[in-house]
Image (tube, rainbow, N blue to C red):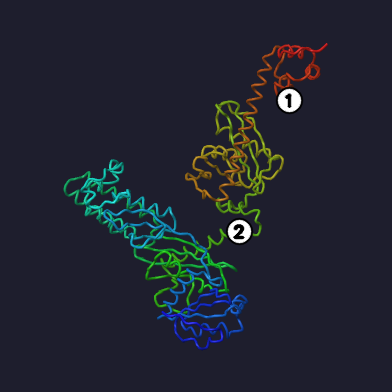
Amino acid sequence: MEASFYTPDDYNTLPDQPGVYKYYNENQELIYVGKAKSLKKRVSSYFVKNTGVNHKTRKMVREIRKIEITLVNSEFDALLLENNLIKKTQPKYNILLRDDKTYPYLLVTKENFPQIYPTRKMIQGKGTYYGPFASVKAMNNVLELIRSLFTIRTCKLDLNPYKIAEQKYKVCLEYHIGNCLGPCEGLQGEPAYMKDIEQAKNILKGNLGIAKAYFKQYMQEAAEKYAFERAQYYKDKLDLLEKYQAKSMVVNPGIKDLDVFTIVTDEKIAYVNFLKIKNGSINITKTVELKKKLDETEAELLLTAIVRLRDQFNSESPEIIANVEFEEEYEGLNVHVPKIGDKKHLLELSLKNAKYYKKEKALAAGDVQDKKFRVLKQLQNDLSLQEMPDHIECFDNSNIQGTNPVASMVCFLNGKPANKEYRHYHIKTVEGPNDFASMTEVVGRRYKRLIEENKPLPKLIVIDGGKGQLSSSVEALKNLGIYGKVPIIGIAKRLEEIYFPEDSYPIHIDKKSESLRLLQRIRDEAHRFAITFHRDVRSKKAFGTQLTEIEGIGPGTSEKLLKHFKSYKKIKEASPEEIEALIGKSKAEKLLEAIGQKKSD
């Protein structure tokens, strides 16, 4: 492929052949790379067309000072070359994928007794790379599976035959715990080791059926020899493989290798979802953004994404399905839009992911009409509430070591704490530490009062606790006849599980979501408020007991002193006249004598 140079005035002399064209500005900076089935027709269109051309394209054309072209054999070759050039040079007017991170691979090294380990750097000749994986978690799941199924070494020793024969190495802990068979000491031969490596490669390629057949064969052979323990060993491996396959999203065993692409757009950004199907299972899912530069059509944007994502994830699937029709057919890209069946369902799944990604980006950017309620709307969606929970009340109990049982209620309005609405409760009808009965009491008291005072009920009630506390609270609502009118949930702290009434299984909101953080903040505030109140009650009770032990000072006088002076220290610092004025001469004299003060003459 040879490059040729032209000026904008020479566009009519360009060849009528497929190729790639590059535009440069007066500073010799590359500003745009394009592909064409006919270079002459495509490049001419920029300089001849006056109608239907957007202002961004006009601005680019005004900057062009030099045109460079490269001829190729087909339009598909032009597409691939265009992708490589854009990825390498990133011209300012080209569509760019907003996804610059490096992806993890699993490397099977090229050496005696190969290793398998993760890497983000690809070094030619070091071995075979599998991936990339869309996330580290997905890669670790595969690596963990391989290490559970096979005894592959994790050390970095140079295990050439000479060093093994000279007994240069000693087995490590991995050998003693059964994760390695000791090739470093010659305890495992390379042919046996390579059998495991070949099966590991099958799993990395997505060919789980071959690996399953491998273990099944050894299991049956062991059983035929009445080696039942060995047969069970292989059965356990087979079960592990079956379990892993069940966890991956199986689409249809009849659908072998397939790439799914869908696109949704707004004014400035396109969102493209990619699902890679390997042997009937989804093994990669990825959504990327493309920033529009020249008001490109959905088909142009999607084509760019297809080429780049297939290149990025080393996909050679013979079939591609998409939600956008292409006007032209590209040799080498078999793209079509399914109308019915499993492939149609796959397309709908991909489109759902693209739309969700777009929605999440809009929420994160504050593009929702009222940004202030973004988290509350997310919480409404997460909990499937009919109304946005702009009024939330949360209850918590506190009875440390079974003493002085109290409870608290905190109120959040529009996602913010409404301190004036906070309430403390002394437990009145329950004896001893009984969280469930205490919760029934305080929830009942709170909403009985709101009903009597004709005040609005909250849009969501949160109970700090699991199913037991939630059931007790539901009982209180039923007694008041308002169960079902106010949504109520329980949040268990250990795993941040959300419980709904009459539902045995909890839900788990994404640990990183803003809605869960709001629930955690409300729960923690209720806990803090209850603990603080409990501490005060214990302190006042201890102080009151200290006073009532003085002869002549009863609970009523103790409470009066406590209310006025707040602490025992302040009573001791108070003047005798102030104490006498509060509780009378006779009691004051006894108190002053007990605390070591004398009334002044």
Residue under the point 57% across and 47% down: 517
- In space, the residues marked 2 and 1 are separated at their CA atoms by 52 Å
Q: Residue furthest right?
A: 601
Q: Quadrant of the N terminus?
A: bottom left
Q: Which residue is mark 2?
A: 365
Is residue 12 positioned above or below 264 on the image? below
Q: Closest to the observer: 448 or 373?
A: 373
Say which label, 2 or 1, has the lower sequence index. 2
Direction from residue 167 to residue 408 in the image, left or right: right
Few, some or many residues within 10 Å of mark 1 (<14, 14–19, 20+): few
Q: Secondary structure at mark 2?
A: loop
Q: Secondary structure at mark 1?
A: helix
Q: Amino acid at mark 2?
A: Ala
Q: Position of residue 312 (x, y in %)?
A: 43, 65
Q: Position of residue 363 (x, y in %)?
A: 59, 57
Q: Closest to the observer: 539 or 178?
A: 178
Is residue 549 positioned above or below 85 on the image? above
Q: Which residue is mark 1?
A: 563
Res 481 → quadrant: top right
Few, some or many residues within 10 Å of mark 2 (<14, 14–19, 20+): few
